[in-house]
Image (cartoon, rainbow, N blue to C red):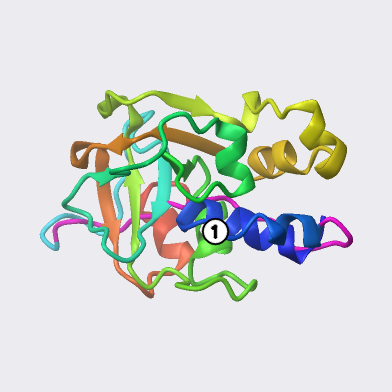
Amino acid sequence: MGAGFSYAVNEANCRPTDPWDLLLGAAGGGSSSLIGPAFSWIRSLAAPRAQAFALGSPNAFRFLRKGEGPGASLVRPGADESVEPWEHVMGHANSPWISVTTSPKTMFDTYGSGSVTGWKGSGEYGYVSLDLSKTNSRIFDAAKNLTVPEHMRAVFGDELSDNATRHNELLVYLRLEAEAIVHYWPPGTTLEQVMKDIGRS
């Protein structure tokens, strides 16, 4: 898949692009993406910088985009609730799904300061770590269970499902409560610091 497709997948997780980008990308290789990212840093300056978390907390990560903050729920008001997960990954313009990843490295390297794809934002609003056991919303494991209709597979092959798998992507439906946000890292935080703070260094 080409750069147009990869760009469309990038936009799907943060704000989708025109479907023509997908078709134009079908001709050649390009970069992959997640979506939506996720990230973190210590919320309270009084807390220790390095902290080992209990198993399962945090269990997902995301970068923040413009208008999102570590103290507020992430929501998709007015979204088309009928959009399927594969349509979100493809780049639907009004998706109800919120992309997160189980990999802090994917979050950082794809959308954070470590991104080499030139993706807009590059972590400029910071990162959050998440405990998905604290959300009541439906969670879809796109990394393992993304099913793509045959007519789309005829155009894109396995690229949609491969992208979701490669980036350990989970999709949260419509709302991710503020209570699920475990920690916040400000812009400029390194991946090494993130890994240290979550006890994975």
Give the quarter of the image for residue 119: bottom right
Q: Is residue 187 left or right of residue 181?
A: right
Question: Residue 10 placed where, x, y %?
Answer: 58, 58
Asked which secondary structure carries label 1, the reply is helix
Question: Number of numbered discs present?
Answer: 1
**Residue sitting at x 27%, y 23%:** 136
| Residue 75, quarter of picture | top left
Q: Circle 1 is placed at which residue position?
A: 11
Quarter placement of the N terminus: bottom right
Q: Position of residue 120 (x, y in %)?
A: 50, 73
Q: Which residues are magenta?
A: 26-44
Residue found at x 50% / y 35%: 170
Q: Nearer the viewer, residue 134 or 104?
A: 134
Q: Say above or below: 97 vs 36.
A: above
- Pointer 1: residues within 10 angstroms few (<14), some, or many (20+)? many
* Residue 95 placement (x, y as % from top left): 46, 42
Amino acid type, mark 1: Glu
Residue 46 is left or right of residue 103, and the answer is: left
Q: Position of residue 166 (x, y in %)?
A: 68, 43
Residue found at x 70% / y 61%:
21
Residue 33 is one of the magenta-drawn residues: yes
Say which of 151 and 1 sits in front: 151
Residue at the extreme left of the image, as rendered = 46
Left or right: 182 in relation to 129: left
From the viewer's side, name the closer residue of 170 and 11: 11
Q: Is 115 one of the magenta-colored residues?
A: no
| Residue in view at x 55 percent, y 46 percent | 92
Per the picture, the main secondary structure of the magenta-coloured stretch is loop
Q: Is residue 200 above or below residue 145?
A: below
In this rendering, position of residue 151 left or right of residue 19: right
